[in-house]
């Protein structure tokens, strides 16, 4: 599944267009590699997403095309959330 679609279906990011923009800005890595919107994700991959002033590390548990809102949280596990320190 494409990264931008996974982010939308799992509800980590609300809209697919926003997910694509975040990917294009280089704010997401898959297993340590900077990811583009079209990058393929699979169960077991580890995503690091930069949301404003924090880094969220997520492990993908399942990849499904159609998910109900209540079940979206079962697609991933949050491994860690760390604040980003500005070095300026």
Image (spheres, grey):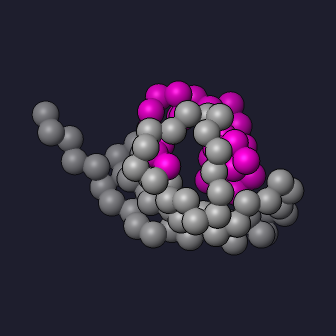
Q: Residue at x 65, y 34 (%)?
A: 38
* Quarter holding residue 36: top right
Above or below 35: residue 67 = below
**15 relative position to 51: left or right:** right
- Nearer to the camera, 52 or 3: 3
Name the outermost residue toward the left: 88
Work out whether residue 1 can be spotted: yes
Which region of the structure is painted magenta? Answer: 1-30
**71 relative position to 50: left or right:** right
Work out whether residue 73 can be spotted: no
Q: Position of residue 44 (x, y in %)?
A: 58, 65
Q: Residue at x 43, y 43 (%)?
A: 33
Number of marks in the rendered image? 0
Q: Residue at x 71, y 37 (%)?
A: 16
Q: Position of residue 39 (x, y in %)?
A: 61, 39
**65 relative position to 88: left or right:** right
* Quarter holding residue 67: bottom right
Q: Position of residue 20 (x, y in %)?
A: 62, 32
Q: Quadrant of the C terminus?
A: top left
Above or below 65: residue 16 = above
14 falls in the magenta region: yes
Q: Residue at x 40, y 67 (%)?
A: 80
């Amino acid at each position: 599944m494409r990264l931008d679609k996974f982010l939308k279906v799992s509800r980590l990011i609300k809209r697919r267009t926003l997910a694509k923009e975040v990917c294009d800005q280089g704010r997401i890595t898959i297993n340590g590699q900077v990811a583009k919107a079209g990058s393929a994700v699979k169960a077991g991959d580890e995503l690091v997403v930069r949301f404003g002033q924090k880094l969220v590390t997520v492990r993908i548990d399942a990849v499904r095309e159609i998910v109900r809102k209540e079940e979206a949280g079962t697609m991933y596990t949050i491994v860690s959330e760390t604040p980003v320190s500005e070095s300026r």
